[in-house]
Amino acid sequence: MTTNITEDSVLVALSEVIDPELNKDLVSAGMIKDVTVDGNNVAFTLEFTSGGCPLKKELEDASRGAVAAIEYVEEIEINVTARSQEHSHEGGGCGSGGGHSHGGNDRSHGLPVKAPIEGIKHTIAVASGKGGVGKSTVSVNLALSLVRSGATVGLLDIDIYGPSIPMMMGISEDLEITEEKKLVPLEKDGLKLMSVGFMIDDETPLIWRGPMVMKLIEQFLRGVNWGELDYLVIDMPPGTGDAQLTLVQNIPLSGAVIVTTPQDVALIDARRAIQMFSQVEVPVLGIVENMSTFCCPHCNKTTDIFSSGGGKTTADRYEVELLGKLPLDLKIREGGDAGRPIATTEPDSKEARAFMDIAQKVAGKIGSMTAG
Ligand SMILES: Nc1ncnc2c1ncn2[C@@H]1O[C@H](COP(=O)(O)OP(=O)(O)OP(=O)(O)O)[C@@H](O)[C@H]1O
Ligand SMILES: [Mg+2]
């Protein structure tokens, strides 16, 4: 009896097997290659960095067991290989060297990785260590400010567990697919938009497993009819865990903007985010200090609700630029919730001008990097 065993289901099963030395699953560690499914028979390569790994047999057995547990699987062929020493990053470890790719074609997910995206000049990740600090707000208003300054811009929401772009841009329509099987981005206020939020309703719980996440993101990057873009702004999910590391090391990024609020707890996470990007050699374009100061609309008194100055201290310490400080402001929050971003609705307000200033600094940084 033949059933639909897929490469994805094999990768999902193998992502349950942990290499105790790397403390990573075999798929994230880049140790699984060349998965093929032929009817009910599965074959794949299990690649170690060194031939003499004591865990080799144990991991081979564990991966065989994981795949055998997939319903209807009959034969399993595992090709166990060792990467040559000159290609090993960790010289003699059992794993893959952490799966870090610095360009080229790492096909650990069965995907072309890090290759530039056709038609897109620059990709900018908007990230933070801590959740809820304003990444999506900054992404939307940064992207709209870049549009206002004359650029062609796309905005991609890869926060697949908590997509905010449909709400913040006030748009959610069914996606169309071209004859070439590419998704057509939605368009609003001159921005091309893509989000997993356009594919599901608000009630649907999302359960994406590691390898499926990378496939979906690859689809969003290369399977979307973006056309020619000067910038693709990417709204990242919060955090600096393994999932985020996999994303940033697999997406071809020109640079990252780190968003933080000024209080210590957020700054510690911002530092982690800076370190994560430097670990995978993605330039940090700078820091945005969000929710900096609150100006009371009644008495005009200013209050540093989340403290102040932390963005500057962190920027100085890591030798990155403080791109700007955004006030804690009712209009910014209301605009986000109502799908009416302030950069579009009140472009001359001081808040919108702060976003424009950040956008110009980001464009300038990228321009100078490209020129250099
Ligand atoms: N400067 C600001 N002034 C007032 N409200 C703000 C400001 N920045 C963000 N907010 C509000 O704070 C909330 C969280 O912001 P946002 O969704 O942009 O954060 P996030 O970092 O993307 O969150 P998540 O980590 O969940 O993706 C939203 O309701 C947003 O409207
Ligand atoms: Mg967000």
Image (cartoon, grey):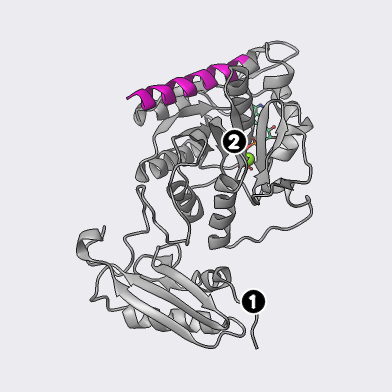
Place of residue 111 in the rendered image (x, y in percent of width and height, measured from the top left) = 48, 57
Mark 1, Cα crowd under 10 Å, few <14 / some 14-19 / many 20+, is: few
Mark 2, Cα crowd under 10 Å, few <14 / some 14-19 / many 20+, is: few
Q: Does the magenta stretch include residue 166?
A: no
* Amino acid at the residue labelled 1: Asn
Magenta range is 353-372
Q: Is residue 362 magenta?
A: yes
Q: Can residue 133 be spotted in the picture?
A: no
Please tell me the numbered disc located at residue 227.
2
Q: In this image, 167 relative to 356: left or right?
A: right
User: Residue at left 61%, top 35%?
Assistant: 155
Nearer the observer, 350 or 116: 116
Place of residue 282 in the rendered image (x, y in percent of width and height, measured from the top left) = 39, 39
Residue that badge 1 annotates = 4
Place of residue 358 in the rendered image (x, y in percent of width and height, measured from the top left) = 53, 21
Q: How many labels does the image show?
A: 2
